[in-house]
Amino acid sequence: MRVPFLWFLLLLAPGMSAQATVSSAAAGPWSAPSTWDCGCLPQNGDTVVVQHQVGLTTDLVHVGGALRITATGALVGGGTGSLWSNAPFTNAGSVSLYRMVLLDGAAWTDSLVNTGSIATTRLAMRRAGRNTGVITAVDSLVFDHCSFHNEATVSSRVTWVRDSLVWNEGLFVSYELVVDSTGLFHNVGTCRVLEHLAVRSAGNFNAATGAVETHILGDADIRWGLNVWDAHVQVDGWLRLDDAEVPIPHLTFFTAGGSIHTRHFRNAGWAAGPGTLCIADSSENLGLLHPGLILCDATPTTPVWPYLDLNTGTVDPGVLVCPAGSCTVGIGVAGDAGLSQVRFAEDGRWLVGLPAGPLHAELIDPYGRACPMELEGLGTARRIADGPAACGMYLLRLTAPGAAPIVLRCFRPGSR
């Protein structure tokens, strides 16, 4: 019954007020009075300043006050040690924990400010936050009824945006990204979804003017909104528009010259321009394509207008079908140094699709700890010479000179 007990403690927060400022005086466990300058343990309501390496060996609940980690400080968990808190959280150092749950802060003023590094297996927040450092969640990252502004680097296996605003102008990498309820993911930086994008209920996924890169390396299932402004979106797998969850037609805008390049396209909703949709392989329209849309199927299977492989819906006469020069299907993504094509071979012992030349590789384990990883060779396929010591879920971070890092999910080599 741990979770109800924790919620009970958090419900006491409104009646608590700051009592004191307690700072670390030496490296040591949180639970040792000798770690703190007061010779006592921090209490709920205290402002806690961590300026040394402080360890958490069990779950910590901190209600009220504030938590501050300085540039020389570190909060390090052992085993399944987790932090539950509704206090404003500022990190300029490093955090490495199994789980962080940041609840009940101010929804629209920054009560999470990260300029350092945060590495967790699971991170959930219900407060406003800003990141100019590095945040890595090996398993899951949940935004619930909050706002978050990323100006640097965020990576996660699964990211869930529920009734929240996530504004990205840095690098945001996730294996799966789910935008749900009234959530909004707004990209003006670099967003890479390595496997699956799902936009459902009343969610929206925007690629806005000035976006550096919006790249879905797998499939995108859109059941509500996708607003592409003067920007480009690339989908390497299926782009599916579907009305299944909503009572009104799905509407996708491609405004001010925006474009989507996808390998496969299936429309069971409602897509409208102005803008360009380029399809490299199969195209299916079961819904409505509105005027102003420029549509191009690079591999049509029929000579009949609108040259779609399957059309049982409606194509408005105002749709322009592949006018000369409108599409360059299969456009690459500039600035990724070829990392966006990297994948594991079936046996799990090789990485393929690599760019030639030097690469830096490291693994991040379920406790947020980074360790180097060796790759043999310099070619497009390289053997994993030294991998994780234990089975389980890891993140593999690859960096090429002059390129932003790419993050992949991996297992112990050979364990698949």
Image (cartoon, helix red, strand yellow):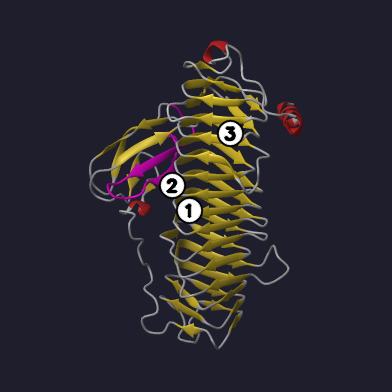
Mark 1 or 2 closer to N-term? 2
Q: CA distance from mark 1 to mark 3?
A: 23 Å
Mark 2 residue element: loop
Kindly identify the amino acid type of the residue bearing the numbered disc 2: Ala
Q: Residue furthest bottom?
A: 317
Quarter of the image with the N terminus is top right
Query: Which of the pair 361/254 is nearer the observer?
Result: 254
* Picture quadrant of residue 267: bottom right
Give the residue drawn at x 48%, y 85%. 320
Q: Which marked residue is nearer to the observer: mark 1 or mark 2?
A: 2
Mark 1 residue element: strand
Judging by the rendered image, the residue that carries numbered circle 3 is 100
Note whether 207 is above or below 349 in the view shown. Answer: below
Asked whether disc 1 touches disc 3, contact meaning CB atoms under 8 Å apart, the reply is no
380 relative position to 17: left or right: left
> For the magenta stretch, what is the residue range?
390-416
* Picture quadrant of residue 15: top right
Numbered label attached to residue 193: 1
Q: Residues within 10 Å of mark 3 (few under 14, many from 20)?
A: many
Numbered label attached to residue 152: 2
Can residue 414 be seen here? The reply is no
Give the residue drawn at x 63%, y 63%. 223
Query: Which of the pair 54/124 is nearer the observer?
Result: 54
Mark 2 or 3 closer to N-term? 3
Give the residue drawn at x 60%, y 36%. 88
Q: CA distance from mark 1 to mark 2?
A: 16 Å
Note whether 66 is above or below 155 in the view shown. Answer: above
Kindly identify the amino acid type of the residue bearing the numbered disc 3: Met
Q: Is residue 407 magenta?
A: yes
Q: Residues within 10 Å of mark 2 (few under 14, many from 20)?
A: many
